[in-house]
Image: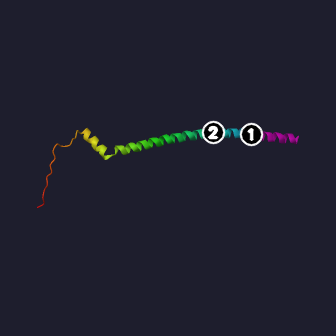
Amino acid sequence: MTRWILLIVVLLGVVASSISLVGLKHESRQLFIELEAATQLQDQHQVEWSRLQIELAWLGEAHRIEQQAAESLNMSEPDQMGLLVLEDG
């Protein structure tokens, strides 16, 4: 009789640990899927950040700002240019 009780207890322990193992394996897979999605999102944000940094550097170039100001204000080079020199004294 005690052997049957011991066998049942061991059998219940094996079944419980098997069920626990399956549940933990499922949870592990779910967490891995979430990790991969977060990694992919991080990569997309890194690409976007790099693109914005390049765009910011391009927008900040002095030559481009000068050219855009000249175009929007209809500025042009003068036809003739003269220099006026003043002497001390």
For the record, the magenta segment spans 1-18
Crowding at mark 1 (Cα within 10 Å: few <14, some 14-19, many 20+): few
Q: Which of 10 and 58 is in front in this view?
A: 58
Outermost residue to the right: 1
Q: What residue type is labelled 2?
A: Arg
- In reply to whether residue 20 is colored magenta, the answer given is no
Between 44 and 16, the residue placed more toward the observer is 44
Does the magenta run of residues contain 3? yes
Three-letter amino acid code at the position of disc 1: Ala
Please report the residue visible at 40 percent of the width from the left and 44 percent of the height from the top: 54
Place residue 36 in its image quadrant.
top right
Does dot 1 land on a helix, a strand or a loop?
Answer: helix
Colour scheme employed for the rendering of this structure: rainbow
What residue does disc 2 label? 29
Locate residue 55 relative to residue 17 in the image: left or right.
left
Q: In the rendering, which numbered label is found on residue 58?
A: none
Residue 16's label in the rendered image is: 1
Going from N to C along the chain, the mark reached first, 1 or 2, is 1
- Neighbor class of circle 2 (other Cα within 10 Å; few <14, some 14-19, many 20+) is few
Dominant secondary structure of the residues highlighted in magenta in the image = helix
Please identify the quadrant where the N terminus is shown. top right
Image coordinates of residue 49 in percent, x first then y, are 44, 43
Q: Position of residue 87 (x, y in %)?
A: 12, 58
Q: Nearer the viewer, residue 48 or 2?
A: 48
Name of the residue lying farthest toward the left: 89
Q: Considering the numbered disc 2 on the image, is that residue within a helix, a strand or a loop?
A: helix
